[in-house]
Image: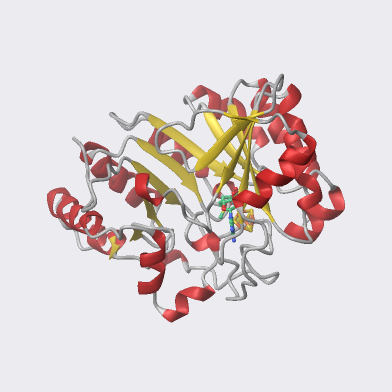
Amino acid sequence: MVLKDNHGRTVNYLRLAVTDRCNLRCFYCMPEHGIDWLQRKELMTYEEMLQLCEILVPMGIEKIRITGGEPFARKDFMQFLIKLSGIKGLKELTLTTNGVLTAPYIPELKRIGIKAVNLSLDTLDQNRFFAITRRDELDKVLHTMHELLKHDIHVKLNAVVMEGRNTEDIIPLAALTKNYPIAVRYIEEMPFNGNGEYKGLAWDHIKILDELKTTYPDIQKIADPQYSTSYNYQIPNHKGTVGIIAAYTRSFCGSCNRIRITPQGDLQTCLYADGSLNVKDLLRAQQTAEDIQQAIKQAILNKDKDGRIAEQKRAATSSQTSMASIGG
Ligand code: SAM
Ligand code: SF4
């Protein structure tokens, strides 16, 4: 079955945030003291999330990415993932993690068929890592990267590029692709730091590419996979690739294939939109799978044409949102 929105786009990708809690405090995502964490009863249970995915996969959702908050910060996350990996018809299961708690679970990730993991790493420098995440955990993240590679799990390294914070890491991160078959992806900073302060975008995708060209003038454009959110490049003779995600500029909305479910069960048809339907409420009201599918279909039909339109319609309070409560 193919799920389409009102603008003819196929929707086949779910990003499911399993928690809003996190063991880091990346300043672009949440304040130092954290956010108003959801109470347990507000969170979707693992059973509810499984039920929901069982409903979504037959509708045309082929790929699920688990995100958060930090997925491994939620108790018994691995048991949930094992069950999720068993859903019939699901073609791809992936996750996004900060890598601090991840390494011990890698053999199990491999066993259940996880082929790719997005690892968030903004800097290779210990002091800058601490300044950005407010925690001293760089070694663990690097260890996770090496373990993933050792287990032949593809690594996409996500780095948010921020003026005065980590622009000196743009080149060292790209240099990692010389010997490692990883995809380093630079992300434009978005206004989701949980306190509503956003100074505007200092480093857009054009500036990031210009910076890469200062050291790698012969960097080559390579084909972007279908539904790719990144513009992709390769430095000659490097094993890996680099990509730039125009997450704030929003140039990829025309091929958007995704929906999001927040930890409390809100269906968001765009990162910049408010939730349009609470699926946890439907599940708890014991609605039938058919009724829930119908409600989800309707919400997807109403998906905004692009992120600018979605943002204009958002409630004023949404400017205080943390990325940890949407999932990125
Ligand atoms: N905790 C996990 C992690 O950090 O990988 C998963 C959740 S995190 C919210 C998902 C992604 O969103 C990360 O790659 C993170 O860098 C990115 N992110 C968070 N806040 C952002 C912001 N304000 N602008 C751009 N990307 C952001
Ligand atoms: Fe935690 Fe990920 Fe947000 Fe950093 S970006 S605070 S690791 S949820």
Q: Measuring from the top left, give residue 297's x and y in whole percent.
A: 19, 52
Which one is nearer the viewer's eye here, 163 or 85? Answer: 163
* Observer-nearest of 212 and 170: 212
Residue at 69% in and 64% down: 27
How many marks can you see? 0
Q: Quadrant of ligand 2?
A: bottom right
- Which residue lies most toward the front here? 217
Decide: is 78 above or below 296.
Answer: above
Q: In the image, what residue occupies the spot 48% across and 32% down?
A: 224
Residue 268 left/right relative to 72: left
Observer able to see residue 305: yes
Q: Residue at x 86, y 54 (%)?
A: 127
- The image quarter containing residue 277 is bottom left
In the image, taking residue 156 as reference, residue 229 lies left or right, namely left
Q: Residue furthest right?
A: 127
Q: Is residue 92 above or below residue 71?
A: above
From the top left corner, tell me how far across and down residue 123 is, in percent. 76, 47
Rendered position, 46 above or below 214: below
- State the residue in front, 136 or 194: 194
Q: Position of residue 180 (x, y in %)?
A: 71, 24
Viewer can see residue 141:
no
Q: In the image, 257: left or right of 187?
A: left
Q: Position of residue 165 (x, y in %)?
A: 78, 58
> Quadrant where the N terminus lies?
top left
Q: Quadrant of residue 192?
A: bottom right
Q: Name the image colouring.
A: secondary structure
Q: Nearer the viewer, residue 65 or 183?
A: 183
